[in-house]
Amino acid sequence: MPGEFTSDRFYWDGRAMVAFPDRPSEWAEFDFGTRQWVDLYDPVLALEVARVSVNMTRTAFLLAAVAAEIIHESDAGPASRGEIPPSLVPVFDGLPPEVRIEAVVC
């Protein structure tokens, strides 16, 4: 609608409605004091957000892991039961204890 200002495209600067500049990234937040976008990108947080949003069945994950040759087909059975696949035992043995426990529990 002509003349309409929406809060996601404009802000009040104390005198008039002003259009936000283009947002540089999804992580950026607008600082009204400086009237600039501030990039709050944090790679650790970005990874956590990505991990939380991923949803894959165990079967789909195992089929993908076999197809990518990450695990052997013979490892799919033990992995489907939550066991560490035999071919990955040496890898797990080299991990810190808290990582090994988290991998088995989760």
Image: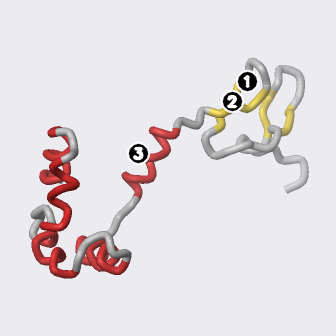
Q: Secondary structure at mark 3?
A: helix
Give me the residue at 49% from left, 44% from top.
46
Q: Position of residue 31 (x, y in %)?
A: 70, 25
Image-based side of 68 in relation to 38, left or right: left
Q: CA distance from mark 3 to mark 1?
A: 28 Å
Question: Does residue 61 appear in the picture of this structure?
Answer: yes
Q: Position of residue 53 (x, y in %)?
A: 41, 56
> Which residue is under mark 2?
38
Q: Position of residue 95 (x, y in %)?
A: 22, 44
CB under 8 Å between discs 2 and 3: no
Image quadrant where one finds the N terminus? bottom right
- Give the tally of numbered discs: 3
Give me the residue at 90% from left, 53% from top.
2
Q: CA distance from mark 2 to mark 3?
A: 21 Å
- Mark 3, other Cα within 10 Å: few <14 / some 14–19 / many ≥20: few
Q: Nearer the viewer, mark 2 or mark 3?
A: 3
Say which quarter of the image contains residue 82.
bottom left
Q: CA distance from mark 2 to mark 1?
A: 10 Å
Q: Which amino acid does the dot numbered 3 rest on?
A: Glu
Q: Which mark is residue 48?
A: 3
Give me the residue at 15% from left, 72% from top.
80
Q: Nearer the viewer, mark 3 or mark 1?
A: 3
> Which residue is under mark 1?
32
Which of marks 3 and 2 precedes in the sequence? 2
